Amino acid sequence: MKNSIKTLVVIALTTIMALPSYGQSKWGHIGGDFGFNGMFYIPDSTIGAREVKEKVRANTWLNLNYTNGGFSAGVRYEFYSFPLIDFEDIGYKGQGLTNYYLDYKNEFIQVTAGTFYEQFGNGFTLRAYEDRQLGIDNSILGARVKVTPYKGITLKGVWGIERKNFDFDYLHRKDYVRGLDGEFSFGDFIPKLGEKGFVLTVGGSFVSKYEKSENDMFIDYPDPLADGIIYADKIPQNIATWAARLNFGYKGFRLEGEFAHKNNDPNNTNGYIYKTGNALLVTASYSMKGLGVEASFIRSDNMDFRSQRDISASTPLLGINYIPAVNRQYTYMLLGNYAYASQPNGQIGVQAQVNYKVPKNTKLGGKYGIDITVNYARFHDVEQKLVPDAAASNMQIGTEGYTSSFFKFGDNLLYQDVGIDFSHRFNNKNWKLDLAYNFITYNLTILQGHASPLFRGHNLMGKVTYKINNKHALKLEIDHLYAKEDDGSWLYALLEYSIAPHWFISVSDQWNYGNEDRDRRFHYYNIAAAFVIKSTRIALNFGKTKEGILCIGGVCRSVPASYGAGLSVTTSF
């Protein structure tokens, strides 16, 4: 099936591209994008930047898409045979056609054959997505159907096999995913509700994973007392999840919620226990002129859901679903070293945020006003009480593991963030000031696997932007993270000069001046320049990157230390 679809798409695209250019409007449109991200690596034993055999590495891809009315087709080629070392570390290495599809849609139906991405609701049951920075591509190869039988009603159905990096031997895979999703919007169905300011949408989804079980599973752990065996006939082959969601709004008020349940799913990430899983996310918000308030509650327990049961928790590979991070996401460099990774197998927490704008043309707010944001987030693990079988043997493997009170916070604090920031543009328009303070508490032992006391850090950020004229601007950012745990205190500075709309030049440095080991008070400097013309961006950089974690939207992975020069080229057409 895989080879047939690939051959069909390649032949179709080749034929289309061979058409004369003067016929593009008649025969449809060809577009796409190309990307190259390469680096020359220099070993540096002081920061842990290891020596690699191939010093020049690169990630390269090319997307080609054809559209003609409601019909579209596409193909992607990726060349990662000598990838950047952080991608090689997570197994993202290889080359080939990784994405190919045929799609047709009109007002009533959309049909896709080949590779596709899809999400049901918040992603509790299904989120097939790509994040190129993280090296995640959980696309599905198969078929998808979307139907809109009436305005306000949407039905979806999917079936297929998840991508596993560059393992293209789909015919020998013994796992696949199938799912259904439906959503009903009362506002579209009953227009008068929308006219009166009401929003009401309800939805639900059902996703099932099948993975054949043929052999007994021998669980081998470093502690011989924890070793166990699960017989093939006791391993569930069909694992089902379902979710229900609600979105209600009236004028400035909004309430959103989703609850999900997963059947017992013994796997590598939960220690091969038979406990069911669940997740709940509730968000309430209110906004009016100059004021916005939002609060969220999230709980997820035993909700890591993968196409293959033996995949490690240290990688997002073959993840079927997604548990979103409700805490505030920062772009501040030093806070990024301690970003919170959402914990699908055990977290309960809250997030609250208030946005207030000091009015314009007032004595305090000045001509443009002052934007103030205050936020608070706190997350714990879930309470765990061993079931009798597990308590008697001191081993959870093959049992239901534990029980947990749904709304009770566990004893271990995972992450806490208390923050406030200000943003103000001065009366002459040319100057803008941003200030932020955060106090974070971070559980290094659970979140990063480093046995360590709770990390407590005070981060102060200041950023000044000066608009010299309509084209030229200068930005200075300084961050200071004061801490005693882990690597101690850090200082970060960035100076960026831009010439709109083409040039960006920057110099930055992270200095670990507070490390207890004076020989490890390293500077991680970076010099970068970028040139942008139309849809093409070319960037050069030279410098050092510290070992740590890279997080985007609550999904994280480890990043090794590196040193060298990089070149990045992206373009779309």
Image: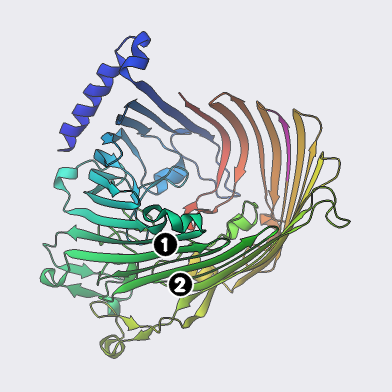
Q: Which of 491 and 256 is in front in this view?
A: 256
Report the front residue among 389 and 418: 418
* Residue 168 falls left or right of residue 357: left
- Residue 222 visible from this viewpoint: no
Check disc 1: other Cα within 10 Å, few if <14, some if 14-19, many if 20+: many
Residue 145 placement (x, y as % from top left): 24, 45
Q: Where is residue 194 in the image (x, y as percent from the top left)?
A: 47, 55
Q: Is residue 240 left or right of residue 491?
A: left
Q: Height in image: 407 above or below 541?
A: below
Magenta span of residues? 494-500
Q: What element carries label 1?
A: loop
In the picture, the disc for residue 347 is 2
Looking at this view, is 458 or 115 the one in front? 115
Q: In this view, does 534 lie above or below 441?
A: above
26, above or below 328, in the image: above
Q: Which residue is tagged 1?
A: 323
Indicate the quadrant containing the C terminus: top left, top right, bottom left or bottom right.
top left
Write down the quadrant of residue 315 in the picture.
Answer: bottom left
Decide if residue 548 is in sight here.
Answer: yes
| Residue 372: in magenta span | no
Look at the image and say whether residue 496 sits in the magenta stretch: yes
Disc on res. 187? none
**Residue 398 appears at what percent x and percent y?**
23, 77
Q: In which quarter of the image is residue 178?
A: bottom left
Front in this rendered view, residue 311 or 88: 311
